[in-house]
Amino acid sequence: MGVMLDSSVLIAAERGKLQLPSLLDSLGAQPVGISAVTAAELLHGCYRGKDAGIRARRFAFVEALLELIPIRQFGLVEARRHAEVWAELAKRGMLIGAHDMQIGATALARGDALATLNTQDFARIPGLRLVALEHHT
């Protein structure tokens, strides 16, 4: 069991609104990772930069993260958890974004907690443990 970092945390760190080293230090020896979906979201943000300078800065930040932080793949085990989460949230009329359901399912499948600034949506996922971030922003 470890902690997955959501894109909201990493984007806030890139923008200087969250102290990532402080957060990582507070997690101690817990394994840290990001989902493959989070990697895609971050890379998407790089490609959407308004000019070459912004794109280059974002790519440098994201590529450094991808070298440092292990990627949690989305395979069959995660797909099964995703289907379960999706069905439960649909039944309760509490759907969240598809990417967020995939990220949450990946954390659940691994037994990981999730560090996110989007607690409103992720708190809807039954059994997903969230990491408090108020001391790092």
Image: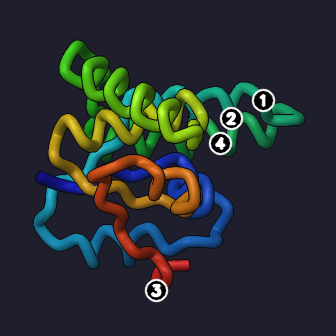
Q: Residue at x 31, y 68 (%)?
A: 24
Number of the label disc, if any, that sits on residue 85 = none
Q: Residue at x 61, y 61 (%)?
A: 12
Number of the label disc, if any, that sits on residue 135 = 3
Q: Earlier in the sequence, mark 1 or mark 3?
A: 1
Would you say the residues marked 2 and 1 are in contact, meaning their CB atoms lie under 8 Å apart?
A: yes
Three-letter residue code for mark 1: Arg
From the viewer's perspective, is 61 left or right of 35? right
**Residue 31 is drawn in which quadrant?**
bottom left
Residue 125 in sight: yes
Q: Is residue 137 above or below residue 112?
A: below
Residue 78 is situated, as x and y percent measured from the top left of the image, at 26, 25
Q: Earlier in the sequence, mark 2 or mark 3?
A: 2
Residue 17 is situated, as x and y percent measured from the top left of the image, at 64, 72
Which residue is tagged 2? Answer: 45
Three-letter residue code for mark 2: Gly
Circle 1 residues within 10 Å: few <14, some 14–19, many ≥20: few
